[in-house]
Image (cartoon, grey):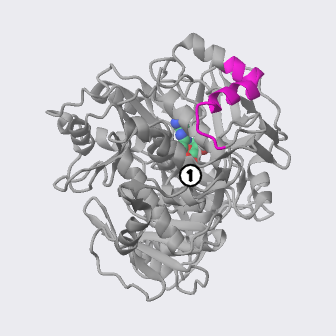
Amino acid sequence: MAYPYQIASLLQYHEFYKKSVEDPEGFWGEVAENFQWRRKWDSVINWNFKEPKIEWFKGAKLNITENCIDRHLPAKAGEPAIIWEPNNPEERTRVVTYARLHKRVCQFAQVLKNNGVKKGDRVCIYMGMVPELAYAVLGCARIGAIHSVIFGGFSAQSIADRLEDAQATFIVTCDGAYRGNKDIPLKSVIDDALIGNKIVKKVIVYTRTRTPVSMIKGRDVWWEDEMEYAETQVEKEGVVSFPAEEMDAEDPLFILYTSGSTGKPKGVVHTCGGYMVWTNYTFVNVFQYKPGDVHFCTADIGWITGHSYIVYGPLSAGATSLMFEGIPTWPDAGRFWEITEKHKVNILYTAPTAIRSLMGFGEQPIQGKDISSLNTLGTVGEPINEEAWHWYDEHIGKKTCPIVDTWWQTETGGILISNLAGVTLSKPGWATLPLPGVQPVIVDENGKEVTEKDEDGMIKGNLCIKAPWPGILRTTYGDHERCRLNYFATYENLYFTGDGCMKDEDGNYRITGRVDDVLNVSGHRIGTAEVENAINMHTGVVESAVVGYPHDIKGQGIYAYVIYNGRMQDMDQIRKDVNQTVSRIIGPIAKPDKIQFVSGLPKTRSGKIMRRILRKIAEGEVSNLGDTSTLLDPAVVDEIKNGKI
Ligand code: PRX
């Protein structure tokens, strides 16, 4: 069998699960034997959630790129590692074999070295979805530099904050990126982010859109020039080599920023050994990958899903990963199905928001496209409503493809709760069972485990995990205390996910959504405090409060209540100005869908905003607002109710 640790039956799932809980050292030690280590571990796991301190495969040495590339070369040099589909269907597809990937990654590692990047340096990557983004990520990993990929939709201000937090000294970017009919000027955004920045030494710029860019002498260099120069250094008499840096299993591999309930995004840190084992293990088991299958994960590499299931999971398994530059609805809503037909995609992994949006176009875009190569479907990022699940099952899977509903987070590195395609049962809207090594607990507000069933037979509460799995975050960059407070301090000795959930009699889990002040808009995490801070920066805004409300396509929309006392003009124009401010400060993804101007916000006598009330009004549930008598100014609630948009 290609992957000896691939779970083949329901019975085996239960057997493996049991072993993973009773003997985690034995279980994960055995799984880890299937990777290439320069030196084996002294111990499989050491941990306490109090500090927290979590170490997997302590003492082991490796380089993740040797596992993602070099070890596949003897058998798979000529096989596709990455199939790249351009934004514009008229443009040519690129197929990157494992041999070519090896060459390009070695070359780019050499480029980094030539430009002075060293092990442990932080390299910010701000690129569109081109194969060079994967080369950049893996090139960093090859020399032991810590990559921090920033999604192309974030603004200059967001980038500047992240550069500062990570103390990044290098940037890799593109002149621009194509997404649908847009041409996003990435380099120009980087230039804005670098105003006043004194620590970035070099910016490497890949040419994609030929958008005019300013190239600052001594700081900015062209990717193409650097790669050409490096080519002769890494290739001698047809042999390509760039020695991979020997990394400790617990050395950081990357930082990825994500939103929390405070105003400032956190830099989640993942390490080399555990993350590699976890992304590979979950990829192989959840999707039941078979060698030769084409895996199409539609996420952007700027998010954790792209890191784990476009790059590290598939490549470490020697798989073929399809990378798509564009969006599902351009040039028309048949794009995913055209790509599926063209590249004979076997596994499609996408977000409920994309499914809902495509569902809105009906079946016509699918007609005439042969999508019979599909054998597995997946969803990620947010709860999937039953209607979307059934549409996906019927029209895309033709009722023959298992659908895996994968629940996980940036912090978890890879999938924690999901059915295993065709091996364990699926249940529409339910993530179902925990993977081996994952021990969920449902607790009430006081941290007490909930064991009593509700009247509908379910156990409900907040989702925590009681022991570490190899892919768990290790810290938040530069601020370990923040990591402890965010995830390990709410409930003693538990990792708190921030999600609410329910469990049925068969032990299946359904994730119901965030229980903290974090929104999930189109599968992207956005902190309400972050959006409020951005809105409050607009001149004339006195105060604001942001909540989520149900949105047909996005899952959740952003509803902002704004107190404005600036010069009164056309209020629609002010709405646009506020949106523009949010775009500038965070990025277009955080723009409120609705802005209601109010004269006051419902507050308790101690000055705390009663979000519960605002949430209910935004959700349209105005008749049952609960007790409002303790408010500082109860009259304000009526005004807000009457002004709801
Ligand atoms: O609320 C959960 C939701 O997305 C959050 C994690 O967001 P992020 O770190 O951006 O990672 C997204 C991709 C893994 C979770 O706390 N979420 C993710 N997957 C699911 C989900 N909610 C319900 N069902 C899922 N399958």
| 301 to 356, vertically: above or below | below
Within the image, what quadrant is residue 253 found in?
Answer: bottom right
Q: Camera-side residue: 452 or 34?
A: 34
Q: Is residue 640 magenta?
A: no
Quadrant where the C terminus sits is bottom left
Query: x%, y% of residue 515?
Result: 66, 44
Q: How busy is the neighbourhood of tag 1: few (under 14 within 10 Å), some, or many (20 plus)?
A: many
Q: Which residues are magenta?
A: 17-38
Residue 35 among magenta residues: yes
The quadrant of the rendered image in which ligand 1 is seen is top right
Residue 515 vs 633, above or below: the answer is above
Q: Position of residue 68 (x, y in %)?
A: 49, 44
Residue in the picture at 43% in, 87% down: 216
Element at badge 1?
A: strand
Would you name the residue on which mark 1 appears? 519
Name the image quarter holding residue 534. Answer: bottom right
Q: Amino acid at mark 1?
A: Leu
Disc 1: residue Cβ within 8 A of ligand 1's nearest atom: no
